Amino acid sequence: MRRTTEAGAARQRLVIAAVGATVLANLPGLQLLLVPVRLFVTYIHEGCHAAMALVTGGMVEHIGVMSSGDGLTVSRGGMPFLIYMAGYVGTSAFGALCLMGARREGNGKSVLAFMGMAVLAVTALWTRNGFGMLAGVGVAAALGLLAGLLRGRAADLAAALLSVLLCLNALMDLRTLLLLTTVTDAPNDAVFMSQMFGLPPVIWALVWAAVSLAITWAALKWVWSGGSVSAPRRA
């Protein structure tokens, strides 16, 4: 009975979070509230580049985060094939992980704290430009404040909303990347990938978009199903 009730509550939070994210993203004036979220996404995106560089044997020189929400990671060595991909796909995976973590009732505070620690780690370890350092501390502090002040259902709902916004922004960034690779020759991760490994940039953007969509869909399905995988039927 408790499992059924918890699954229903998780679905309800997911629906409310999805509606809230849609409203914030589309109603004029409210979009200003998404500026910290935009920066949050950038820290995760650049942090995924940096983490993959380290994991594959490279070194991270620095990360820069600008007031426009753009970011840059400079690294040496490692496996470029995975490093370039890690920004977009890694952000989707991080959002999916947070979404799955927020499914269980009472986990909201932990998920919010985890988000804050992730931003703080990216800021402290690699971010070196003035705005990036100040904004990183600010975003991390805001997430920590939410984790400290919110209780129960409010914390769970806030964690679900931010997780959905993170996933949504990651997919929107991929949509922007697809547009950039089809109508401009502006430098971006897909262009760098094309220069190093061949194939048109738009192909790499499509591959990353497909992987990110699959990750997000799997997380949403898992949350909606109550966090369980159906057991195979016996003949």
Image: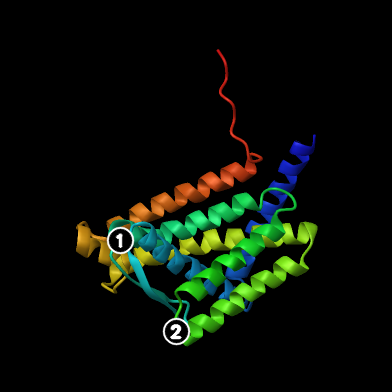
> Which tag, 1 or 2, sits closer to the chain's start?
1
Is 25 positioned to the left or the right of 193 in the image? right
Q: Which mark is residue 78?
A: 1
Regarding residue 45, the answer to whether it shows in the image is yes
Quadrant occupied by the N terminus: top right
Closer to us: 206 or 38? 38
* CB under 8 Å between discs 1 and 2: no
Which tag is nearer the camera, tag 1 or tag 2? 1
Q: Is residue 73 visible?
A: no
3 or 130: nearer the viewer: 130
Q: Residue 77 is drawn in which quadrant?
A: bottom left
> Looking at the picture, how far across and down is residue 7, in whole percent?
71, 42
- Asked if residue 49 is positioned above or below residue 216 in the image, the reply reads below
Relative placement, left or right, of 215 versus 180 is right
Seen at 74% across and 47% down, the residue is 9
Q: Find residue 217 and report its horizontal and vertical position in percent.
A: 52, 47
Given residues 48 and 166, the one toward you in this image is: 48
Give the vertical position of 147 relative to 133 (above or below): above
Q: How is the image coloured?
A: rainbow
> Residue at 39% of width from left, 76% of height from top?
62
Tell me the residue that label 2 is attached to: 129
Relative to 37, is 114 above or below?
above
Q: Amino acid at mark 2?
A: Asn
| Residue at the farthest bottom position | 130
Q: Residue 154 appears at what percent x and percent y?
A: 76, 61
Residue 202 screen position, x and y as percent: 29, 60
Name the image quarter holding residue 173: bottom left
Q: Amino acid at mark 1?
A: Gly
Q: How busy is the neighbourhood of tag 1: few (under 14 within 10 Å), some, or many (20 plus)?
A: some
Local SS, label 1: loop
Q: CA distance from mark 1 to mark 2?
A: 23 Å
> Within 10 angstroms of label 2, few (less than 14), some, or many (20 or more) residues?
some
